[in-house]
Image (cartoon, rainbow, N blue to C red):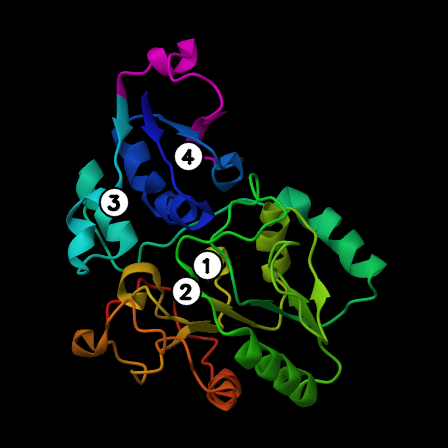
Amino acid sequence: MNTYVVEGGIGKCTAFTALIPELKQKSEVQIYTPYIGCFANNPDVKLVLEQSLPIQDPRIMASENIYYCEPYKSNFQFGKQHIIESYCEHHGVEFDINMKPKLYTEHLKENVKKWLDKHNIEKYILVQFSGGQSPIAYNGQYNNINPNRNYQPFLAQQVINMLKEEYPDTTIIDCTLPNETAYMNTIKCDLHWTEVHELLKDAETFVCIDSCLNHFSASTEKHGIVIWGSTRWTQFGYSHNTNLQFHMKKEWDETKFIDSDPRNNMVEPKLVIDELKKIDKNKPVACATN
């Protein structure tokens, strides 16, 4: 049995799940992570251990190997690898762009249904315009080490208003944390983040930034719009979604990317809505490469 130490946020942990079927071919898989919900109930994972436990836990020490990698301190920094590709390189797995994350949250379906019934919600669209915080460690003060990923609140409210105008019988559910910007014409989601994954399955669509919702969309095979700021969709995105950035039109152009440019995510709200109407919901999930 091999133990894999998987750190980072929910998005990175979700992305790592794309490797698990291949890792299982080598040996039984055990995971040591802060986000057990990304790996719980996975039939290819023998055991998930929460990272508050010491790494010297007997169940970890019984492993044949303990593997750890941090893509952010590797070739990934050159900007030419998808996050899943980077994990593959570190763990000796052949990368395929069709590899996709998979979370198992079916056991939460009834909880989600109760929440929707409580709020009299039938049809709904999910949005997430800010992030960068841990849902298990956030406090009253919003703190994000990479705020240029966030969509401008002024523009986000316009997108929401246009969504309500275009889809008047559809509820807009805001999947950000309680200490993040709230918007008119939305309902703030207070479900656990694993339940948000289950919630996404029956959504009409979604609009988000580079966030956990982006990675959840690959797991649930839900198509939507992702707005990009200080990160590359060729590193964190998926090609079944419509990826938008101020300086680019659907095809990634590295010559136009400066991660610190505050204009990157200032995508016109009307463009977001126009592209949402044109989404091809039959497009297969794959890692974005261009």
> Residue 244 location, x and y as percent?
38, 78
Q: Is mark 3 on a helix, strand or loop?
A: helix
Q: Residue 237 carries which label?
A: none
- The numbered mark, 1 or 4, whose residue comes first in the sequence reads 4
Structural distance between the alpha carbons of marks 4 and 2: 33 Å
Structural distance between the alpha carbons of marks 1 and 4: 25 Å
> Residue 93 location, x and y as percent?
20, 42
Residue where numbered disc 4 is placed? 44
Structural distance between the alpha carbons of marks 1 and 2: 9 Å
Segment colored magenta: 43-65
The quarter of the picture where the N terminus appears is: top left
- The numbered mark, 3 or 1, whose residue comes first in the sequence reads 3
Q: Are marks 3 and 4 in contact (CB under 8 Å)?
A: no
Q: In this view, does 15 lie above or below 254?
A: above
Q: Give the residue type at disc 1.
A: Ser
Structural distance between the alpha carbons of marks 3 and 1: 17 Å
Residue where numbered disc 1 is placed? 211
Q: Locate residue 69 relative to residue 132 in the image: left or right.
A: left
